[in-house]
Image (tube, grey):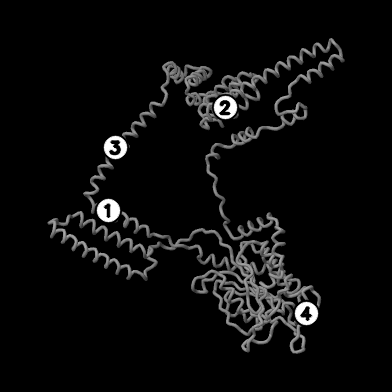
Amino acid sequence: MSFVNTQHAPYVIFFIIVFCLTLFIMNKKYFSWIKTYWSYKRTIPSYISSSLYALSISLMLISLLDLRGPEERIKSTFPDQRTILIIDSSTSMLAEDVRPSRFSKAIQMARHLVKNAAAHQVSIVLFSDVQKRLIPFTDDIDLLDSRLAALEKTNSVSGGSNISQAVAEAVGYFDFEDNKDQAVGNIVVFTDAEESEGEFDLEIGPNVNLAVVGIGTVNGSNIPLRWDDGTFRGYKSQKGQPVITKLDENYIKKLGKKVKNYKYWIANSYSLPTDEILNFFRTSYNKKQSKGDVRVRPVYSYLILIPAIILYCLSIVIGRLKTFKALYSIFFLISIVSISYANESGRDSQKKIKEIPKMIQGDLEKMKAGKYSRREVLKIAEKFLKNDDPERAMEIYKEYSKEQDDESIMFNRTTAQLKAGKIEEAMPDIQNLFSNSKNENLKNKLRNNVLLALNSKSGGQGKDDSKDKKQENNEEKNKDKKEKNKEEGKEGEKENSKEDGKEDNKENKKEDNKNQDPKPGKSGNPDDKKTDQEKPSKSENEKENELKKDPKDLEKPERPTEGPSSREEKEKKIEQQRKMVKTPAMIKQILSDDRELQKKMMDTSTSERSSQKPKRDW
């Protein structure tokens, strides 16, 4: 362990000495005044309090030096790379020695690079005489692609080429404090390398990767000029002679002499060096990561601050000991009251536990001795349930009941679970009873038990709700009785119809259909009955799915998804997300509107040319 801010140690020592001397002199004057006028001597607790106070303040000042431990390597998330695309928009980029033109080819390569640059924050810069940043760093592909596509339509190509200055100014867009060597990122320049402003010393830090894509041919070509509607109006000329623009590969080589991480490519009409550029950035990025970008020094200043705070509190307590005597007594009384209250609450909780009746205790002793059969043990559980002790009853049912037991045992078991508040555990038995049992009286009792359990779990909804539920239960019972009566009436009518003949049978059926009351919520059609039967209740299905789950899995909290373990995994995830998201056409349409305004914003040419600047404007 060592201090990070050791350069400030002399100042800290100086302040500690000054503070201790000042405290000593002031205490001496104060207590001498007390002795002169009140004849009181300074006590030992006072000396201890002042010394502890001075020591605590000294430790707090020492903690400002930032105590750190040795370097440790930790796992960290991979940050996105920052990449700046610099596109040459000078007049020479209108040459068509590269199809469709140098500028259109640059836009095409830039768009392809944006779509394939996963885990990159991309910014777009346009330059000719001066440079302008069109888009700050973003990973929004739709925004970048639409703005690049709009560059071709705005006819913003004009002016000369000031490549070195554009690159030097673009470095300033990376985040760094004082030194340019702290800047980290990637720069891609699409240009024909025809510098029109003379040589410029390029200073780029070691952590910036520079990639230059030369667009054009060595033989060169004329510069066609067109009107806003695209019609040809002639070639660029100077002093009556047509201008021929050529790719300057020598200038591209000179540009990277003072740059540590540099690479260039020459693009023709059919080349797309996107993969090579991204691999160049990826390899240099991985090298930087392996050099120790994820090393940290843990902070241990708290080892000094904690004792300082404790000593400060002790100095206050000891210095005001007489004042604290009353507080000590109050604290003592409060602690006694709280302890007695805790004991009383514990007794009350013990009283709340129900005592087992003597009859059941005798049965339990016989059960422990092994004198009772399984049926007799289940009878003991039934007694517990009648005694309003569902938890003990549920324990016995869990151990001794089986799935093959009759309806009464299953009913008692579910009742015990519902009374104990274990509604989810009771759901399989409830569904089994409702589907297999033919005892309507048992089903009605089970419905009432379920409603009571739900009310007790939710805290109850008042007397009005309970009355409404009773009315609903009575209505359901009446409906069941009506349906039974109708079925019996139908059977009697069928027997009479056999004797009376076909004609009477038809008439009786029509009358019966008229007299039958349709069920609530149904139209009476057989198709409607089928659809009603086919629709299962959502609550029952959800509860079945929950019960199918392992109870251990329900107790486990959901773990957060872990981040990517490597840069390749992160890039694959981002590419998958991009494929899943559809391109919003509305954004492209909005950004393509008002081309005149975009043309003014994208214009990087200037007419201010003094004697120091050459007259070349392409």
Nearest the viewer among 522 and 582 is 522
Q: In the rendered image of this protein, does residue 513 appear above or below residue 119?
A: above
Q: Quadrant of residue 578?
A: bottom right
At numbered mark 4, what does the secondary structure look like: helix, strand or loop? strand
User: Answer yes or no: do the residues labelled 3 and 2 have beta carbons within 8 Å?
Assistant: no
The CA distance from mark 3 to mark 4 is 98 Å
User: Answer yes or no: do the residues labelled 1 and 2 have beta carbons within 8 Å?
Assistant: no
Horizontally, is 373 left or right of 312 in the view?
Answer: right
- How crowded is the residue under tag 2: few (<14 C-alpha within 10 Å), some, or many (20+)? some
Name the residue tied to disc 2.
451
Point out the tag, 1 or 3, that comes first from the N-terminus. 1
The CA distance from mark 3 to mark 2 is 46 Å
Q: In the rendered image of this protein, does residue 113 appear above or below residue 455?
A: below
Name the residue tied to disc 3.
336
Instruction: Please name the amino acid that badge 4 sits on.
Output: Pro
Point out the tag, 3 or 4, that comes first from the N-terminus. 4
Quadrant of the snapshot with the C terminus = bottom right
Identified at 67% across, 87% down, the residue is 615
Residue 228: x and y in percent read 77, 74
At numbered mark 1, what does the secondary structure look like: helix, strand or loop? helix
User: Answer yes or no: do the residues labelled 4 and 1 have beta carbons within 8 Å?
Assistant: no
Name the residue tied to disc 1.
314
Instruction: Please name the amino acid that badge 2 sits on.
Output: Leu
Point out the tag, 1 or 2, that comes first from the N-terminus. 1
Name the residue tied to disc 4.
224
